């Protein structure tokens, strides 16, 4: 498995997204993914499946040290005491003493970064997270967070797929030496059937979904496609045996103009405009 390095973190370049996976479906998905060769799991307090992620990891037989696991603290728990309670509950759910990466899931505009980022950095200093980072941060938020952080922020987890223009925030992440973890990398089902992706896929003997994932990998991102289907899981990891040409990458980048944002909840920030 290829990795992306950022501020000392070595993040496997494909992960299993687990949002909405519940109960035994989640346990079996995590177990199957790890046995198939995945080494990166993504969960969050908000997903309500940390227990299942931990159980799937134990059932897989893969050694804990070989798995890179991420969890997140939600925007309503960013004050120091609440942050610590949320993280301690996450670790209890996972039955782990630490996670590899802890993220602020969404910012809370009413809490200054020196407080929320301070709580995040304390988690690392306390040994409860090997690395820390953020999710859904804009360019301005990244600059403000870096101005007050005492620990390197190793990643920004954001929505990236061929149908959205994230050039500004991708450039800001590069500036800060951060990895970019790409959620909804298949645009919640909009990729299969898309003419350009299907056509490029046929040229390589690959699916449209595999083309989307490969596009993200060549951009330097770390896609975390969500699936409980072992066939899709296998397909999603088989994207390191082909390359997209410069012309194909340029054609896919043209699709960014659609600027279709799939995830935009009420508590989202004011996003960067292309």
Image (cartoon, helix red, strand yellow):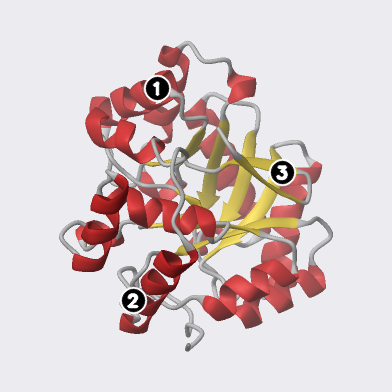
Tag 1 and tag 2, C-beta contact below 8 Å? no
Query: 10 Å neighbourhood of mark 3: few (<14), some, or many (≥20)?
Result: many
Q: Quadrant of residue 179?
A: bottom right
**Helix or strand or loop: what does disc 2 sit on?**
helix
Q: Residue visible at 47% across and 89% down?
A: 273
Residue 52: percent from the left, percent from the top?
37, 28
Relative side of 24 to 158, left or right: left
Q: Quadrant of residue 167?
A: bottom right
Say which of marks 1 and 2 sits in front.
2
- In the picture, the disc for residue 9 is 3
**Helix or strand or loop: what does disc 3 sit on?**
strand
* Residue 1, placed above or below residue 14: above
Q: Residue visible at 50% across and 29% down?
A: 94
- Mark 3 to mark 2 CA distance (whole Å): 31 Å
Query: 10 Å neighbourhood of mark 1: few (<14), some, or many (≥20)?
Result: some
Q: Quadrant of residue 63?
A: top right
User: Which residue is the site of mark 1?
Assistant: 36
**Helix or strand or loop: what does disc 1 sit on?**
helix
First-in-chain label (3 vs 2): 3
* Residue 7, placed above or below residue 50: below
* Residue 75, placed above or below residue 271: above
Say which of marks 1 and 3 sits in front.
1
Front residue of 158 and 191: 191
- In the picture, the disc for residue 178 is none
Q: Residue visible at 49% across and 66% down?
A: 246
Q: Residue visible at 55% across and 42% down?
A: 70
User: Which residue is the site of mark 2?
Assistant: 255
């Amino acid at each position: 498995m290829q990795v992306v390095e950022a501020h000392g973190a070595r993040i496997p370049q494909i992960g299993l997204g687990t949002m909405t996976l519940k109960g035994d479906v989640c346990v079996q998905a995590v177990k199957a993914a790890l046995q198939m060769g995945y080494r990166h799991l993504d969960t969050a307090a908000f997903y309500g499946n940390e227990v299942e992620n931990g159980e799937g990891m134990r059932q897989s037989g893969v050694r804990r040290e070989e798995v890179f696991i991420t969890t997140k603290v939600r925007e309503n728990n960013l004050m120091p005491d609440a942050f610590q309670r949320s993280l301690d509950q996450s670790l209890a759910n996972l039955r782990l003493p630490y996670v590899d990466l802890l993220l602020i899931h969404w910012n809370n505009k009413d809490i200054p970064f020196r407080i929320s980022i301070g709580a995040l950095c304390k988690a690392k200093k306390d040994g409860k997270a090997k690395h820390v980072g953020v999710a859904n941060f804009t360019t301005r938020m990244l600059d403000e967070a870096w101005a007050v952080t005492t620990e390197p922020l190793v990643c920004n987890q954001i929505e990236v797929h061929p149908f959205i223009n994230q050039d500004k925030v991708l450039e800001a992440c590069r500036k800060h030496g951060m990895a970019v973890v790409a959620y909804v990398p298949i645009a919640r089902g909009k990729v299969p059937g898309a003419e350009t992706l299907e056509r490029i896929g046929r040229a390589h003997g690959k699916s449209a979904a595999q083309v989307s994932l490969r596009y993200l990998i060549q951009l330097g991102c770390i896609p975390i496609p969500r699936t409980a289907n072992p066939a899709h899981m296998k397909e999603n990891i088989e994207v390191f045996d082909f390359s997209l040409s410069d012309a194909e990458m340029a054609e896919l980048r043209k699709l960014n103009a659609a600027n279709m944002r799939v995830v935009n909840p009420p508590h989202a920030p004011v996003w960067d405009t292309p």
